[in-house]
Image (spheres, rainbow, N blue to C red):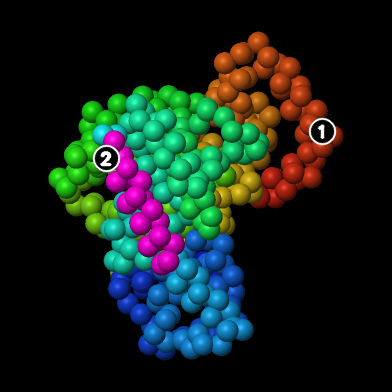
């Protein structure tokens, strides 16, 4: 496990998660109530309340309904309930797809939770399924008939540009029926590779139209998806846990030559290497080290995951942009170089965040002037906050 100086809260949280992953439970609590209350506040915004409470449940009294421990236990039970209801709902959806001859591929959390020592450890916010696009309209009509609504995008508008149709229904159901896996604007190479995923899928033995990925493709998609979150607003601890669980379950049988070849093609060598090492160091009981013993890039990745919540935030994104620049450079990135890159970003930045400008190069000079104007008059506070987050050492 990785120990951080002067950060008792995250140290305890990671220790509790490690215990659960090892199938262990505390019989006596070695922490103060004050420390545990801080951990509770931390884990509930990081998506790891269930896995951490499971290490405590034999040793704590959570009967007092006014206590934080009661609320922690309730979150663990609610996570279990959500998983059960998601499983039931996903079963109804795939039953419809089977009956209508629409091939489908469950993705991400709904698959990897079965690799955990106990599936209840893996909290679920949504379920993702890739489906045959010939059945897309039928699937949409079915979801609407079950009381779902189409989720609008971040601007509150329902559009057709994303990689999935997103459906929401009370109390918490959120399903993404994917059209494809990786957006071209994020990575053309990843887009091309996963666009042909159907040709490499393996048919489920107990289903007529259900499929699953090879372990190699599942891992590649997991890394690409994690990096997409990381390069936007950051990825939380749950991504680290998924990495650890998957490699512990499948690591010895993977075709790593094939994986490494594709990782190089995707330009994710440093990210993959850091994620592999940090996840093992963070959760392997047989490993104990101080954060200072990590390399600069490993430390930056770990720090980012601990501070990103479940799906990240803008402050984490600023840190991660510095990490990405460092990963693509043989030298340490100075603050001056970081500012230059932020003011005059590369083509990948435009492709991901401003595809219109990327496709219409003629407007780039005008867009650059607009950005500089906004930063000068409306974004000065954010610029200062960004520099504070990035810091001198890693940027």
- Picture disc at residue 376: 1
Q: Is residue 221 above or below residue 160?
A: below
Q: Answer whether residue 219 is visible to the viewer in this image.
A: no
Q: Is residue 214 above or below residue 123?
A: above
Q: Position of residue 33 (x, y in %)?
A: 57, 84
Q: Quadrant of residue 209?
A: top left
Residue drawn at the location 31% of the way across and 67% of the way down: 118
Q: CA distance from mark 2 to mark 1?
A: 58 Å
- Whether residue 231 sits left or right of residue 273 in the image: it is right
x, y (%) of residue 388? 70, 50
Decide: few, some or many residues near mark 2? Use Cα within 10 Å; few <14, some 14-19, many ≥20: few
Report the residue at 80% width, 40% height from top.
380
- Is residue 358 shown left or right of residue 280? right
Q: Position of residue 287 (x, y in %)?
A: 34, 67
Quick check: is 49 in the magenta stretch?
no
Q: Residue at x 26, y 34 (%)?
A: 101
Q: Is residue 308 visible?
A: yes
Q: Which residues are magenta?
A: 80-100
| Quarter of the rendering occupied by the N terminus | bottom left
> Which one is earlier in the sequence, the residue at label 2 or at label 1?
2
Quadrant, the C terminus = top right
Q: Secondary structure at mark 2?
A: helix
Q: Nearer the viewer, residue 31 or 200?
A: 200
Query: Does residue 158 lie above or below 226 as drawn?
Result: above
Of 200 and 260, nearer the camera is: 200
Give the farthest residue toward the front: 145
The reply, left or right, for residue 131 in relation to residue 359 is left
Q: Secondary structure at mark 1?
A: helix
Which residue, given by chain and number where applicable, does mark 2 sit on?
Answer: 99
Residue 70: give x, y in percent of width and height. Answer: 53, 81
Q: Quadrant of residue 349?
A: top right
């Amino acid at each position: 496990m990785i120990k951080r100086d002067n950060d008792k809260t995250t140290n305890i949280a990671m220790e509790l998660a490690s215990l659960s992953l090892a199938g262990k439970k505390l019989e006596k609590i070695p922490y103060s109530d004050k420390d545990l209350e801080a951990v509770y506040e931390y884990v509930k915004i990081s998506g790891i309340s269930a896995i951490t409470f499971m290490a405590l449940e034999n040793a704590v009294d959570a009967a007092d309904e006014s206590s934080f421990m009661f609320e922690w236990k309730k979150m663990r039970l609610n996570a279990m309930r959500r998983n059960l209801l998601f499983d039931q709902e996903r079963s109804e959806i795939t039953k419809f797809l089977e009956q209508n001859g629409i091939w489908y591929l469950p993705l991400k959390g709904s698959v990897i939770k079965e690799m955990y020592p106990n599936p209840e450890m893996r909290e679920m916010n949504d379920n993702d399924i890739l489906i045959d696009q010939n059945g897309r309209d039928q699937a949409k009509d079915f979801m609407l008939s079950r009381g779902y609504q189409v989720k609008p995008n971040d601007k509150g508008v329902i559009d057709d540009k994303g990689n999935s149709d997103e459906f929401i229904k009370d109390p918490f159901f959120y399903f993404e029926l994917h059209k494809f896996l990786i957006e071209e604007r994020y990575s053309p190479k990843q887009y091309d590779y996963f666009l042909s995923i159907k040709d490499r899928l393996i048919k489920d033995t107990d289903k007529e139209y259900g499929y699953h990925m090879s372990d190699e493709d599942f891992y590649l998609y997991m890394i690409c998806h994690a990096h997409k979150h990381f390069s936007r607003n950051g990825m939380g601890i749950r991504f680290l846990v998924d990495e650890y669980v998957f490699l512990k379950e499948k690591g010895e049988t993977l075709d790593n030559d094939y994986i490494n070849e594709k990782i190089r093609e995707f330009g994710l060598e440093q990210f993959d290497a850091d994620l592999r090492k940090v996840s093992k160091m963070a959760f392997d009981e047989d490993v104990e080290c101080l954060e200072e013993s990590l390399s600069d890039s490993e430390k930056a990745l770990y720090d980012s995951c601990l501070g990103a919540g479940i799906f990240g935030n803008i402050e984490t994104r600023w840190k991660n942009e510095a990490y990405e620049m460092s990963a693509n450079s043989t030298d340490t990135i100075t603050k001056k170089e970081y500012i230059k890159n932020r003011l005059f970003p590369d083509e990948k930045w435009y492709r991901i965040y401003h595809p219109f400008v990327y496709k219409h190069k003629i407007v780039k000079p005008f867009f650059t002037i607009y950005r500089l104007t906004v930063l000068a008059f409306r974004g000065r506070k954010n610029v200062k906050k960004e520099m504070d987050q990035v810091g001198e050492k890693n940027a």
